[in-house]
Amino acid sequence: MNSKQLYKEMLGLQGSWYIKSVTLSKEIKQVTVEVALRKGLVWADPTNRTARAHINGWTERQWRHLDTCQFKTIIKARVPQLKYSDGTVKELPVPWADRYARVSLSMEAFVVELLQACPNIKSVCSLTDLSWKTVDTIMKKAVERGLTRRAQVPMEHLGLDEKSIEKGHSYASILTDVSGSRVLNLVRGRTQEAAQELLETTLSQEQRASVQAVAMDMWPAYMGAVRETLPKASIVHDKFHVVKYLNESVDQVRRREHRAMSAAGFSPLVGTKYSWMRNFKDKRSSEAVEFRALHQMNLKTSRAWTIKETFAHFWTYHSISAASSFFTEWSNNAMRSKLEPVKKVVKMLRRHLDGLLNYTRYHITNATAEGFNSVIQLIKTNARGFRSFESYRARILFHCGKLDLCI
């Protein structure tokens, strides 16, 4: 098989196109493959079956192809501009690349594989000798291709969460499929309008009708968006956010007590912030023994910690009536603690009791979204900032959307 036949097979050329020449330059380590159209071809006019398209001009194009034996491979061709009877002019599609692309389909598929394996776009640019813009465009095309291929299957349980995208108060709303452990889509902002746009543009009408429950924080904007867009779906307040609020209340009590005891001369709470949040699996470890000794002191922080730990039993109930009875007794005891940070959280939980009790019916959380936090943080760190929200969105969907990205 000679070189022309080899590249003909590699590019999948048939009929109209043929390999005109293959040039090797050892000085610049490059292979140039020139592809040409056979003479005497006639093209049909899709706008008029009785007419034919006319050549309006030619464009010199070139594409980056997969390397040949570590030599950069460039495909060159003169591509005709076809004019139809209705006056429109379109460039003739080529079989080895998408319209207006700068790389071949084979190269594009290779870049997608590298993006899945490499931590950032710069690494892929270094490996392929392609520009950042070209690689970024390939990633965005792969994401849009994957979204187009995504099956419109029913989804019963969703998650709605927020993620910081830049320094300051800049957020994105992220919609996740709880059962499928994947990111469905995200939009800029965390307002009710943004959340409604996210739900309406991501889910079809049939999918919205199939949703039974949505796990979320107690953010009013998200609650309002779900009530407007998914009126039949139950709101389930996320377990991890409730635990976070309780942990924060314990820490606020600890800080107040630490300041008061330090002013009196001695505080055993120095450096114990994270001890009150840990779960000591090995009860016989030195850290666990030290914590038990600290907890047994007559401290306000110990009382706040006990209230927080006791609430963990709430998540084990499967009966709404039993969970409601437990919550009533627990909240009454917590309100009698005279610990203002704890009482503040209890009042908030009382206002959202329906969403808490819905957990006993569905037992869903935003663990999927929380689990993506480390992945998203790594994406942000490796990117060292994003040039646009579209780039941020593309990367998250590329790595967390479980999309079919193949060419």
Image: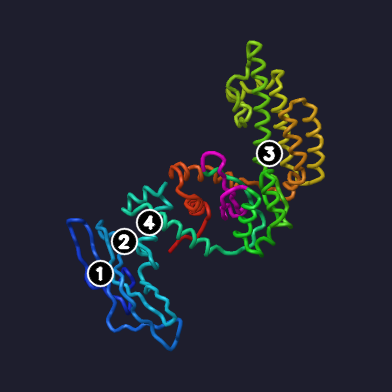
Whole-percent x, y for residue 198 in the image: 61, 55
Residue beneath the point at 70% across and 32% down? 309
Crowd rating for badge 1 (residues with CA inside 10 Å; few <14, some 14–19, many 20+): some
Going by the numbered disc 1, the residue's amino acid type is Glu
The answer to the question of whether label 1 and label 2 lie on touching residues, with beta carbons closer than 8 A, is: no
Determine which of the numbered discs, if any, sits on residue 34 in the image: 1
- The residue that mark 3 highlights is 242
State the CA–CA distance, disc 3 to disc 2: 52 Å
Could you say which is closer to the camera, residue 400 or residue 306? 400
User: Which mark's residue is nearer the viewer, 1 or 3?
Assistant: 1
Q: Specify whether 81 is left or right of 166.
A: left
Determine which of the numbered discs, if any, sits on residue 64 in the image: 2
Residue beneath the point at 32% across and 63% down? 63
Q: Main secondary structure of the magenta part?
A: strand
- The residue that mark 4 highlights is 134
Q: Is residue 70 magenta?
A: no
Going by the numbered disc 4, the residue's amino acid type is Thr
The answer to the question of whether label 2 and label 4 lie on touching residues, with beta carbons closer than 8 A, is: no
User: Which mark's residue is nearer the viewer, 4 or 3?
Assistant: 4
Going by the numbered disc 3, the residue's amino acid type is Val
Q: Residue furthest front?
A: 87
Determine which of the numbered discs, if any, sits on residue 71 in the image: none
User: Which mark's residue is nearer the viewer, 2 or 4?
Assistant: 4
State the CA–CA distance, disc 4 to disc 1: 22 Å
- Quadrant of the image containing the C terminus: bottom left
Going by the numbered disc 2, the residue's amino acid type is Arg
Q: Which residues are magenta?
A: 166-190
Whole-percent x, y for residue 150 in the image: 55, 62
Could you say which is closer to the camera, residue 188 or residue 275? 188
